[in-house]
Amino acid sequence: MNLPQTVTSLFKRLRFVLVETSHPGNIGAAARAIKTMGFSELVLVNPRFDYALTDPEAIAFASGAQDILASAKIVSSIEQALAGCHFVAAVSARLREFSPPVLSPRALAENLSGQIQEPVAIVFGNERYGLPNEIVVKCNALINIPANPDYSSLNLAQAIQLLAYECRVAQLGDAGSVSPIGFHGDLASADEIDRMYAHLEQALVAINFLDPAHPKKLMPRLRRLFSRTQLETEEVNILRGIAKKILDGRKD
Ligand code: SAH
């Protein structure tokens, strides 16, 4: 018998690990990047300054994400940072001769969201020298952001933002997508749409476009056409306005 498996959202089981970060401002910006995308777990391995989490620059760059800084952990080894993780990805601007399989940020995000309950981690390197080979070889995947080959090194917090975004989109799936039309008004109700079809049908009959004795598939086809869009009340009113004008014109 298959027992139902519990699913733990990626938002709750993804850890962002920063190795030997130099600039407190980047740590603050990382906290903000993580929080804007719905994640919360930040672990620092040997940051340059012990007080990095309370540094005024970190706090300023975190903006409204100070709670992430307050709950972040500082540890002294990568092993401590990765404790309990079942899948670890190293994020690096440099490809190496000996490395785990290379994945794009998107492929990684899909992979992580597909694992259903294991804690997982993404590891980022120092601003100047990146991640050492000893850490990369411990990881299950190497993630390279396909940037401009002539200038491929992103700011640390921006690299984190990009990975966090991909993970968010992968986790939310369709639920996270928004309408491609930026602005939209109130969607028409099924009733309003039905009344619009009735009105349109009358107008089409009035101008002899629709023969009630031989309606063929005209109305179903029109329904199918409009059902491919999400009609708004205002749009339904415009179509009814056209039908009304046609009918009024016939009376003259
Ligand atoms: N000169 C360093 C770049 C450090 S940038 C190097 O050679 O690696 C700081 C961190 O941001 C990197 O360790 C990595 O985690 C991330 N990063 C920046 N640009 C990246 C890219 N194009 N692909 C993957 N990770 C990147």
Image: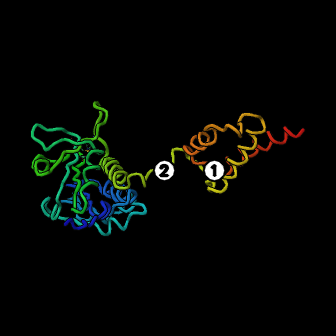
Q: Residue at x 57, y 48 (%)?
A: 230
Q: Residue furthest right?
A: 252
Q: Is residue 216 above or below residue 179?
A: above
> Percent from the top left, x then y, of residue 90?
19, 49
* Quadrant of residue 32 within the rendered picture: bottom left
Which amino acid type corresponds to the residue marked 2 in the rendered image?
Val
Q: Residue at x 10, y 37 (%)?
A: 97
Is mark 2 in CB contact (under 8 Å) with mark 1?
no
> Percent from the top left, x then y, of residue 33?
36, 55
Q: Secondary structure at mark 1?
A: loop
Mark 2 or mark 1: whose residue is earlier in sequence: 2
Q: Residue furthest top?
A: 150
> Percent from the top left, x then y, of residue 220?
60, 42
Residue for badge 1: 232
Q: Residue at x 12, y 61 (%)?
A: 79
Front-lying residue, 64 or 107: 107
Image quarter where the C terminus lies is top right
Neighbourhood count class around disc 2 (C-alpha, 10 Å): few under 14, some 14–19, many 20 upward: few
Q: Is residue 33 above or below residue 220?
A: below
